[in-house]
Amino acid sequence: MRILVTGGAGFIGSNLTRLLVAGGHAVTVVDKLTYAGNLSSLADLQGKPGFTFVQADICDAEAMRRTFAAARPEAVMHLAAESHVDRSIDGPGEFIATNVTGTFQLLQAALGYWRSLSGAAKDAFRFLHVSTDEVFGSLGPTDPASTSRPRTTRIPRTARARLPAITSPAPGWIPTACRSW
Ligand SMILES: NC(=O)c1ccc[n+]([C@@H]2O[C@H](COP(=O)([O-])OP(=O)(O)OC[C@H]3O[C@@H](n4cnc5c(N)ncnc54)[C@H](O)[C@@H]3O)[C@@H](O)[C@H]2O)c1
């Protein structure tokens, strides 16, 4: 598959990208390379077929539109975020910009791209938003989405209920998903 991974130079994104490329997927990584991103974590993939790196800010609507047009992804895995929650106390602005406005811009770019698709490609397109229990609340030990249990659809449904602005624009889109780990 052709997969667009945002935040692919981060802790989880770099390992995810390595796994996807090893699995034969064509991966385009979009990353702003903030203090949390490190291109050296993808050094072994540089120059490999199936790997493309784009340094860009997900808040940049035009850059996201261009990236979708070039990468023509079949799926998006959105991990770009200000992820260190403690930092939001001193500098909440960056969190609003990336996690809210940036996610919105990325969704808009994905929606515009998705509308340009047709048939099976349109039906099969997926957008996966990886976020955190800081957004969705803690899970109890018997919660069906607990890490000790197989993945369920409960969290995406909960997320949709709590984040009406990021509801699915089309059947089959996964508006957001979360594992607490
Ligand atoms: N690491 C964990 O234990 C954990 C736990 C629960 C949820 N999560 C969630 O998973 C996701 C990824 O986590 P992580 O630990 O890999 O985060 P990370 O902080 O290591 O990486 C985030 C990446 O996003 C990039 N980025 C930040 N702002 C950007 C922007 N505006 N445009 C483009 N790229 C930008 C950074 O450069 C970095 O490479 C986050 O949503 C996080 O909340 C992580």
Image: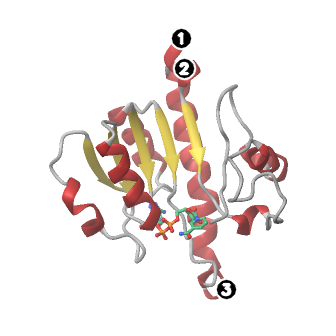
User: Distance of mark 3 from mark 1, alpha carbons?
Assistant: 46 Å
Q: Which residue lies furthest to the top in this view?
A: 119
Q: Which residue is drawn at 70% across and 25% down?
A: 171
User: Distance of mark 2 from mark 3, alpha carbons?
Assistant: 40 Å
Position of the C terminus, as image quadrant, is bottom right
Determine the secondary structure under disc 1. helix
Q: Residue furthest front?
A: 148
Label 3 belongs to which residue? 89
Q: Residue at x 40, y 77 (%)?
A: 35
Q: Which residue is drawn at 52% across and 39% down?
A: 109
The number of discs equals 3
Label 1 belongs to which residue? 119
Splitting the image into 4 quarters, where does residue 13 fall? bottom left
Which residue type carries mark 2? Lys
The answer to whether the residue bearing label 2 lies less than 8 angstroms from the nearest atom of ligand 1 is: no
Q: Position of residue 153 (x, y in %)?
A: 74, 41
